[in-house]
Amino acid sequence: MNLKSIFTLTLLLIACSLQSMAQNGAYGAYEDIQNFFHVFEDGQFKQLEALKVKDYKVARNYVAYVNNQGQFKLYEKGYNKTLAENTPEFFTVTDHLLIFGVGGSLYIYEDRRAQQIASFVKEYVGGDSIVAFNNLNNNFVAYYRGRSRTLEVFNVTGLAGSKNVLAYLDNLEQFQAYLYGQKTMLDANPPKEYKLGRNTIAYVDFYGRFKIFHKGNIVEADPFAPRQFAVGDDLVAYINRNGQFMVFDDGIISEIESQPPTMFQLTDAIIAYTLPSRQFKAYTHGQTYDLESYEPESFAIDNELLVWPDYMNYLKGLDHGVLVKASNRIQTGYEIWIDVVACNVTKGQPQFYYKGKFY
């Protein structure tokens, strides 16, 4: 096996490992009419607080929140723990990491423990498995899978981060990427535009060519810049200069529609879009789905779940490629967290949908 094959295999093993770690649990949260704070965990409900919480955010494997006394707490796998006695300056939830700031220092919670990774960090970018920042010594540092690494000895510019990839301009304005613990120079010149997703960076280079960096390889998708593009999980959706609606799907480029959509949104693994005829459609994993003959008033995407209200205000969904009813009662609002949907159906407990069941 040659060196390139070994490197490719290593990237695949890391990707599979991260994916498997991110596929445990199902969480949601809500406050009832008395402002009691409840968590939904794998089909079960549990009250966590009897007083109104100040803030909360739901991730794939946990719920992080600030309670009424200002303590920063986390609930995961049946246990409630205090991460900080004082209210954090900020906190960001991702599939794999919890990122938060206390006393000017940057912390991450990973593998059931919190650790400080930097002091006095004003700006950072973070994703499911990666955090990057300029430290006090003006070094550019990336934290990935338990290890901090100095990528540049000077501050960087144009820093952008996604779930597991970074893009930035170094002090020579060279366009750099950091993926799976490996730094790659994408171009010696700064790009005109770039966007990031899982394993993927799509960009218009210095000369106007549309390129895609995916799992360590650079593909020239089009010799001309697209009219519009978006990036998700191993996906790039774009409208080329001829008006064709195109997709780069895990290395394969194909046409979704021969005409440009009036609207499209790519989030995670799903592209939702509307045609000029107002037909509402979706693309995921190589398949196109006809959803409605009209454009819904709203929709939401997370992971591999797309939900939207129908004309009767029941909630419909495309759940891992299967068309489902995401509510069996008329709803007046909804939230979505990974594979869990919460619908407002009464003034008390919302109705939850998870894996084809209602709770």
Image (tube, rainbow, N blue to C red):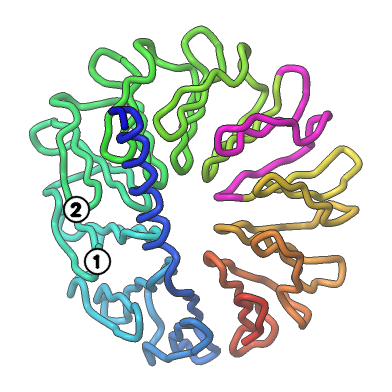
Q: Specify the amino acid type for callout 1.
A: Asp
Q: Residue at x 73, y 62 (%)?
A: 308
Pick out the residue farthest to the top. Answer: 207
**Image quarter hosting the C terminus:** bottom right
Q: Quarter of the image holding residue 167?
A: top left
Q: Residue at x 46, y 23 (%)?
A: 218
Q: Which residues are magenta?
A: 241-269
Q: Is residue 232 above or below residue 183?
A: below
Residue 223 colored in magenta in the image: no
Callout count: 2
Q: Is residue 299 left or right of residue 275?
A: left
- Which is nearer the N-term, disc 2 or disc 1? 1
Q: Specify the amino acid type for callout 2.
A: Gly
Q: Is residue 59 above or below residue 358?
A: above
Q: Residue at x 26, y 75 (%)?
A: 70
Tell me the residue that label 1 is attached to.
111
Q: Is residue 108 left or right of residue 224?
A: left
Tell me the residue that label 2 is attached to.
146
Helix, strand or loop status at disc 1: loop
Helix, strand or loop status at disc 2: loop
Q: Residue 310 at what x, y percent from top left?
A: 82, 66
Q: Residue 201 at what x, y percent from top left?
A: 46, 31
Q: Residue at x 42, y 66 (%)?
A: 59
Q: Residue 221 at what x, y percent from top left?
A: 59, 21
Q: Is residue 103 above or below residue 174?
A: below
Q: Residue 76 at what x, y percent from top left?
A: 34, 78
